[in-house]
Amino acid sequence: MKVKHIVGTVLISVGFLIALKGVIDGNQSMINAGIGGLFLGIIVFTFSTSEYIKYDAFKSVVLPYVELSRKLVDALDLKSKAIYIPPYTNLPRGGVFIPLHEDFDLDLARFDEGTMFVTDVGREREMGLLLASLGSHLMNLYERYSEMDFTDAGLNAVENSSYVLRSLGLANYVRIEERDGRIYVYVDGVRMDTCSKACEQVACPICSSILLSIAKSLQELILVEEFKIEDGSVEISARRIGGIDKWM
C-alpha cells in the first residue's frame, strides 16, 4: 500500500472516531474536528486513486455519520425541516439547525461551535438540534477552485461549482433558480444511494454543501421545504428566512 493510501486511511479512521465521540458526547467542536479529518482523508484518496476508489472512500466515510445523525433526529422526535445557517462570528463554518417545532424561533446569539442540543432556552419554540454541516468542507473546495469567497457572491457562484462535483465523480451538474419567493435546486446524477425524504432534515454532503453555499452566497438563513428524488436526480425547494441580524 502506498504511503498516501495509508495516510488517507488513518485520517479517515481517526476523523470518524472523533466525530462519533463528538455526537455521543454532544460536543460540536469534536464533530467539526472529526469531519475535518474525514474530508482530509477523502481528499488524499480523491486526487490519487481511481474514480471507483474516490466514490467508495467518500461513501464509506460519510454514510455512518449521516445515518447516526438521522437516528439522533428520530430519537429526539424532531419533525421540522432543516435550516441552513451561513457562517458568522459564532459559527465560522456555518451549521444546520433542526427545530423541535415547525412553529420555531431562533436566537443565534446562543449558538456556538460547542453547541449541539439547544435546550437551555426560555421558550420551547427555540429548542432543537444544531449539527455541523457535512457540506462545509465541500463548500470550501468549491471556493478554493473558484478562487472566490462565496459571501454575498450570489446564486451563480454556487451553480458554477458543478465542475468540482463532476471532477470528484459525485454529481453531473447543479442548476439553481429563484422564482415566486422560492429557491429551486436541481442536482443531476447524484451518486448517493441514501437520498430520501430524510434529507429534508439531514442531507448528504453533496446537497448539504449546495444548500450551505446558497446560504453563504445570499447571507441569509435557508429553510428546506421539500426534497424530490428520482433516478439519481434531486430537486430541492427552499426559501430565504432572513439574515443573521434578524435572528440575533
Image: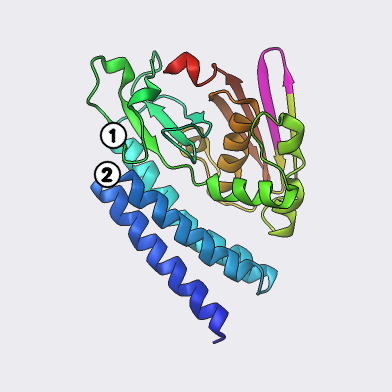
Our reading of the magenta stretch's main secondary structure is: strand
Horizontal relation, residue 178 to residue 86: left or right: right
Task: Work out whether mark 2 precedes mark 1 in sequence or the reverse, and give the earlier one.
Answer: 2
Instruction: Give SS at disc 2.
Output: loop
Front residue (pair 58, 145): 145
Instruction: Give SS at disc 1.
Output: strand
Residue range highlighted in magenta: 178-186
Seen from this angle, which residue lies furthest bottom?
A: 1
- Colour setup of the view: rainbow
Tell me, yes or no, whether the highlighted magenta stretch contains residue 217: no
Provide residue 121's location: percent of width, then percent of height: 25, 21
Q: Residue at x 58, y 69 (%)?
A: 44
Image vertical order of residue 102 relative to residue 161, above or below: above
Type of amino acid at the residue the image marks with label 2: Gly
Provide residue 82's location: percent of width, then percent of height: 47, 29
Provide residue 126's location: percent of width, then percent of height: 32, 19
Type of amino acid at the residue the image marks with label 1: Phe
Q: Alpha-carbon distance for marks 2 and 1?
A: 7 Å
Question: Disc 2 marks which residue?
Answer: 26
Horizontal relation, residue 221 to residue 149: left or right: left
Horizontal relation, residue 70 to residue 24: left or right: right
Tell me the number on the disc at residue 117.
Answer: 1
Front residue (pair 154, 46): 154
**Classed neighbour count for the residue bearing mark 2: other residues with Cα under 10 Å, few (<14), some (14–19), many (≥20):** some
Q: Quadrant of residue 208?
A: top right
CB-based contact (under 8 Å), mark 2 and mark 1:
yes
